[in-house]
Amino acid sequence: MVSLIELNAAPIDRLEADRADEFGRTQLQIAYLISQYPKISHTFVRREILELERRGWVVHRFAIRGWDAELVDKDDLRERDRTNFVLNVGVRRLLLAVAQSFIGDPARFVKALRTAFRLSVRSDRSLAAHVAYFLEACWLVQALQQRKLSHVHAHFGTNPAAVAMLVGELSDITFSFTVHGPEEFDKASVIHLSEKIRAAAFVVAVSSFGRGQMFRLVDYSDWAKIKIVHCGIEDEFAVVGPIEPNPVGRLVCVGRLSEQKGQPILILALAKLAARNIMPDVVLVGDGEHRALIERLIAENGLQRTVRITGWADAQTVRQEMLNARALVLPSFAEGLPVVLMEAMSLGRPVVTTYVAGHPELVIDGENGWLCPAGSVDDLADAIERCLGASSAELQRMGENARQRVRARHHIGTEAKKLSEHFEKAIA
């Protein structure tokens, strides 16, 4: 009997579903679920997927949305062609999947629906949103089962983890998810993060700080399932040859122009430095809801000639902006462990950043960068002044230290191997 989902689902590449390696062995397969993919700020997900594939996995990409997103990176454009978008299948297909799920196992259907209602209680998302997650989960179960997949991994503990959790309740498919922060920790209770951790096969933290935050949410008996897997940098991005310090008085800040990243503090710190006749060129790479505020502060403090905002840029442009700078500056108020720190350090650039979240796990003050308290204009200005006053020899020493630390802690091959082992255990 042909199922409703088989009649109405998007086409499936059977060659991909049944792929084998050169020795004829069936490859390990897994599904990835992300709210929006590909996305300019989610290069770490793309790196992880591609490295898993280099290690022999077949990764089936699923995203709730994002097929119409504006993209600037050619690698993201290629990833979009390989991604299945749940909401792009249409309401009719989602409803047919709901009917198929109910007919297949009414008891599980009712249990999962109750979970969706429970997750909506005290949530920052409406009941209607959680009903939508349930519909998405019904379709996703059918799609995964048709591909003979037994595990799905979600990135972020928000709605992707909720959909993955509902998939687990509707079927025998297990799930895991990666928590990045800081949003998940800011609203842990409203997204029911502790319940998702308890239901998952395992959970990934990208830093020791992140794991500690999750330890607070669950009983000791669940601590063992919370694993640390760092975001990774590939060799192709990093500098392979000797470190060449850049003595120019230019700094680069890469990140979304948002309340978490603290760029207004950077502009105020630059104004203080200008009063000391210290006026470095500063390039802000990124865009976001705080752009208008930042542009106003630049104008109010007379910094239009020394501060430039580029908007979003592709990976090669970001890389070149980092190489063109003396150091990266990231005045964050809240973070997980941002990939741009790893990228700059892998290029031999020291960093100026704040004592928040996972930053001190990577950046050692005076060895590979400069750390200062978050929210302090004076301390950030002083740290930038120390950076600008560093000699070429000091920049070279710190840049080499930075590169070695990233390679030791954030090499994509090493981190993907850890993740691969966790997946194999979950599937087994």
Image (cartoon, grey):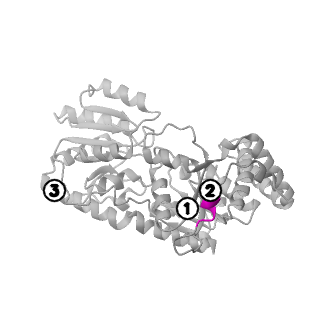
Q: Quadrant of residue 144?
A: bottom right
The residues bearing labels 2 and 3 have C-alpha atoms spaced at a distance of: 44 Å
Amino acid type, callout 3: Glu
Q: Nearer the viewer, mark 3 or mark 1?
A: 3
Left or right position of 368 against 120: left
Q: State the residue position of label 3.
A: 394
Q: Judge by depth and name the residue closer to the eye, 32 or 288.
A: 32
Q: State the residue position of label 2.
A: 193
Amino acid type, callout 1: Met
Q: Are marks 1 and 2 in contact (CB under 8 Å)?
A: yes
Q: Quadrant of residue 201?
A: bottom right
Tell which circle, 2 or 3, labels the residue nearer the N-terminal end: 2
Can residue 330 be seen at all in this image of the molecule?
A: no
Q: State the residue position of label 1.
A: 214
Tell me where the magenta segment starts and ends, as one range. 13-19
Density class for disc 1 (Cα within 10 Å; few <14, some 14-19, many ≥20) is many
Dot 3: element: helix
